[in-house]
Image (tube, coloured by chain):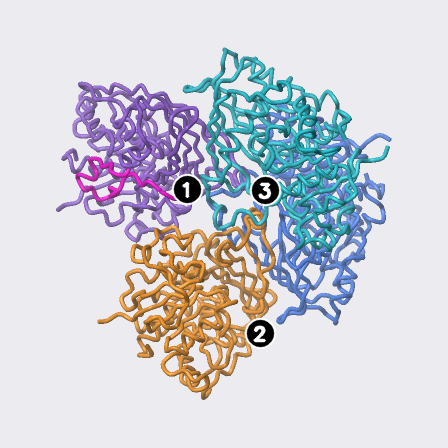
Chain colours: A orange, B blue, C purple, D cyan
Amino acid sequence: MNKIRVVILGATGTVGQRFVQLLDGHPWFEVAALAASDKSAGKQYRDAVSWKLDSPLPAYAASMVVTQCNPELDGRLAFSGLDASVAGDIEHSFAKAGYAVVSNSKNFRLEEDIPLVYPEINADHLALIETQKIQRGFKDGFIVTNSNCSVMAFLPAIHVLEKLVGVESMTVTTMQAISGAGYPGVASMDVLGNVIPFIKDEEQKIQTEPLKILGRLQGNRIEPSHLRISASVNRVPVQDGHLASVSVKLKNKAAIPDIIAALRSFQGVPQQLSLPLAPQRPIIVHDLPDRPQPRMDILLEKGMAVSIGRIRKCDVLDYKFTGLVHNTIRGAAGAAVLNAELLFAKDLL
Amino acid sequence: MNKIRVVILGATGTVGQRFVQLLDGHPWFEVAALAASDKSAGKQYRDAVSWKLDSPLPAYAASMVVTQCNPELDGRLAFSGLDASVAGDIEHSFAKAGYAVVSNSKNFRLEEDIPLVYPEINADHLALIETQKIQRGFKDGFIVTNSNCSVMAFLPAIHVLEKLVGVESMTVTTMQAISGAGYPGVASMDVLGNVIPFIKDEEQKIQTEPLKILGRLQGNRIEPSHLRISASVNRVPVQDGHLASVSVKLKNKAAIPDIIAALRSFQGVPQQLSLPLAPQRPIIVHDLPDRPQPRMDILLEKGMAVSIGRIRKCDVLDYKFTGLVHNTIRGAAGAAVLNAELLFAKDLL
Amino acid sequence: MNKIRVVILGATGTVGQRFVQLLDGHPWFEVAALAASDKSAGKQYRDAVSWKLDSPLPAYAASMVVTQCNPELDGRLAFSGLDASVAGDIEHSFAKAGYAVVSNSKNFRLEEDIPLVYPEINADHLALIETQKIQRGFKDGFIVTNSNCSVMAFLPAIHVLEKLVGVESMTVTTMQAISGAGYPGVASMDVLGNVIPFIKDEEQKIQTEPLKILGRLQGNRIEPSHLRISASVNRVPVQDGHLASVSVKLKNKAAIPDIIAALRSFQGVPQQLSLPLAPQRPIIVHDLPDRPQPRMDILLEKGMAVSIGRIRKCDVLDYKFTGLVHNTIRGAAGAAVLNAELLFAKDLL
Amino acid sequence: MNKIRVVILGATGTVGQRFVQLLDGHPWFEVAALAASDKSAGKQYRDAVSWKLDSPLPAYAASMVVTQCNPELDGRLAFSGLDASVAGDIEHSFAKAGYAVVSNSKNFRLEEDIPLVYPEINADHLALIETQKIQRGFKDGFIVTNSNCSVMAFLPAIHVLEKLVGVESMTVTTMQAISGAGYPGVASMDVLGNVIPFIKDEEQKIQTEPLKILGRLQGNRIEPSHLRISASVNRVPVQDGHLASVSVKLKNKAAIPDIIAALRSFQGVPQQLSLPLAPQRPIIVHDLPDRPQPRMDILLEKGMAVSIGRIRKCDVLDYKFTGLVHNTIRGAAGAAVLNAELLFAKDLL
């Protein structure tokens, strides 16, 4: 089989590095180009990147020469970890040039004709691609996005509850890792031994993006969910892993054992299709009363599972639980790769 | 003026050390004895204690010989930072022996005849002392308690909202400092670069103690508040300072500027009486969008003020805000000293 | 091939957990029993252990019932991660009962007839086993030890320099991870945002153990090296990885490129024998000026390589460099497993 | 008494903020202007600064309008916390304009006619000012500097040993706080749970600046000390406080009790003159085996004392000890203020 030729956009950034790592030895995709800013272009990747992962820089990438983000590059699939300040134009130009653009950037997430996909939840939203091509005059190219990283810490569980008995509203307080802010990102003087109760624009993303993902495809558009979400975000001195304390108000009654059973048995399209990066268990329910914890649980299922624990009654809404996601794997680069695998398995590449 | 002779119970512990520090040079109280476990008794305090504060051990205490927790000790006022496993018996025996016991321990907080006092909120609850003396057969002694430390991060603000328009329910997610667990307390392997979404019994305390403090004194008992509280607690790698993300549902409408004005102008009995440890501003409202933060704001008003920030709409309940308290000063030893100052000013010592 | 039956002594401790992890799927060894204190004995391992590694508890171990440290157990090889307070008697009794005891504990390291082995350096010291058996009346059993974890951060490099031109003396300042103190070990209140310039007995170990490892086997005893070592130890808020700033005085001149070449080309017996856990490169020399770093480099070669960087002139001795070792893999459990693999390959099991 | 009118250069930076804090209520100096980059000029200080200290921004400074670094400003004394990239020109222009420039920047430290002063050690080096004025054509103005912050952690102790028996050479391994790199400075992703064994140019500063400070004034120049210093620097996840592990080779024998006595009794010119910021004890010797520690000891004597502990034999050189300095108080802004107080007391302002 010929592998799909891949370009990584923003290859030197925090999410870009995860793309480089996750695509090492991928069965379907082959990295043909590492693209980044003009400052990096022309250098070998090993010299252009300030590698921040605790596994070594993959050999395949080390000596590749970084290119500019030029849609003339020969490839079919582009993963984007670009900064929002430049992602819009570049991603659009790659789609225009025939690329399937699978983006982690926020720019297009909420546009009506762009799928915002969590593949275990709304794989059917890929149907928007056809509309998108027509509306934007793309021939072969298109754009697919994944959500903000902290959304992932609770959304699969909310989806399961929605299917089970319906969810009316939810509150979520996040405790987010520093890697979510990229590099250099959060100054050590701000976060060491401290908590910062603010991340710019983050609460807005958490309150809106899930409504689209949980929405219903109707004709060529998405009818958003009516779930009401209230988010309070915090930055904590943790390397990787966004933790979320969640309370939910359900539409109908459900007993805790039934909720746990539904979470544990949940399987989605990626599991049915046995996508390479799909976790066997998309949701892992922990029994220990003090779990999940970022340091211990973010690497379960190679960082692609979401952990849920402490499911218990809430005296104000109905139930409370704690969710955890690896913010740069399942919450970012891994989410995008899984989206691309879904596209491939559905013959959309 | 003769100062009141004071015994510190549990003087070598984390809260005990704060008592030793806060009572250094106190205008009304004089430390007559430092009492601790049998293991420490007989040693000089400097040798018995593993001093963990970043200010030096006060000179007055260094060479005092630690005594057992013996109610025969000559004194009038006992501050207790005892562990709950022993606090019950010892505190009771001191009260029996004629001591005014001002305790930070949880043992008696919810007993019907024991005042649980946050002096800016419910100074009038001290009226329970009379009933208590009668019921328990105390002659001059009695017990007064303060609440769990994390409660302090939000309770003064809730009280102000209650007075303003009434509060129906609230959710709170805490991010609590390691000093709250005492010493050795939390193992570094558990909390370094991590968040632990669990603290034993803490959610229960947060959900019940405020109801008593906000309750109404009726005859010789407290009619508890009907406020519903749901708490989710987390331990974070922060030295001192409990942070809380709070959402509230109000009984009547209130505009944010009015809420801020009410919080800023709030004054209680300690301010009216100019108690020595009373903060001039019991509640400080921050304007910067990323405040309050533990590292920056816990020492405002010498650690006796509560910080509030990020007051904004909540899409599920009505409003959200972030609260912060210094957990071992305003949240523990400082709260107890303020309670004792209130007793003194009200001629109850 | 029948695998060697293995008992892990102290299986619930920090080092014991690494044994459980490293022996998962081992080609030569099979865990037959997990032994620990009486408190744990009788429980399933998953219930007895407070698992602290960031990979899940291996399935093979989870439901094993923990046994007492009883030499009647049926097995041939015992890995010991026991606390020094009990290691002496237990290890001796296992050796007496016919076990090859491969210990990470300090108790026997410096005894004349006990090999203290770093297999890339002094595999020949295993010859002491024969003497040991005779002197101690062991029939089939014997004891082999590995050194203190922080020694590993510099010793392979010192050995290479010793072979190259001779080393006269060295100073080393360590910055050691919290996992080196076991669990619960270092209190978070002591080390969060702090450095503790002291670890009990550690400097003594660092100054003596290398002399034996670098010593020469003469007849049935080891003639210790005359190297002079001065150590200054510090505990830092790092999860895993001991870092060491080292200065060395050489006996003869050597140019930096020659030193680097010698370090990079170094191979020992484990590499020649292709032992399963042997790192391909026992010493990795870093080029970047700010490496090695614990967070980035401890997992190189699966945690079995030692990292060296910043090789440069010293204005007081001759050269300086920075060394790094994963303290619970290469520095403890991994070192012991490699020792056992060496024993197996040499037909000593 | 009319206070000396002071300009703070680089007032919004990390060191600048300490100047603002330390000069609050100073008995001799009065802040007349806060000067910073063009970006900040024109704003109120409270809006221009990202205040990072845990005490509130002093009221006197909050509403001052930040000015450009313009030597036309009316004042006599300029404290400089400027970045080295701009410090040279600006400081020189202020000196030219008649200012006594007391600088924490590195630019002029090693120039022959500029005093590099640690007032307890080499107050006499201020004699260079006369030469400097002549050589540079300054009329009333001049420049005085203090050393790099990490030097302070050991230099007073070395000076005492030098006076006692002479010091031939020393090695020092530093563990330096993040505040030493300014703001934003060290990225949290680099230092959280990590140690970075490198700080650009720092080892060179540590190896050269002490030689000038310990040097002898001969006529109008300094004969540098012949002490040999070898430094290895590390950045650790500590907020404030540089820790140093030091080994020294002495010229003559000295017993540890004599060394301790000499350190404890050490007094310098600032103590003799009772300068306002002079610590009563410039060197504090700790008895506890695990001290000094940054979190516990940096604020001794309001951050102006240097802490020494763990004095013991070194098997390679002669003695070892651990030193600690508050890097932004005694190690930077406090050092400069003390230098200015010395100038004032010596009638040089």
The numbered mark 3 sits on a residue in which chain?
Answer: D
At x 70% / y 21%, what residue is drawn? D269
Q: Secondary structure at mark 1?
A: loop
Which residue: 60% across, 15% down? D261
Give the residues in magenta: C264-290
D340 displayed left or right of A173: right
Pinpoint residue B245: horizontal percent, then vertical percent: 62, 59
Query: Marks 2/3: CA distance?
Result: 52 Å
Residue A228: which disc? 2
Task: Please name the residue that numbered disc 3 is placed on.
Answer: D84
SS at mark 2? strand
Q: Nearer the viewer, residue D14 or B135?
A: D14
Residue B50 image offset from top left, x and y in percent: 58, 31
- Nearer to me, B17 or A97: A97
The three-letter code of the residue at mark 2 reads Arg
- Chain letter of disc 1? C
Whether marks 3 and 1 lie on the same chain: no
Look at mark 1 in the image and give the residue it sits on: C289
Which of the two residues, D147 or D268, is positioned nearer the viewer here?
A: D147
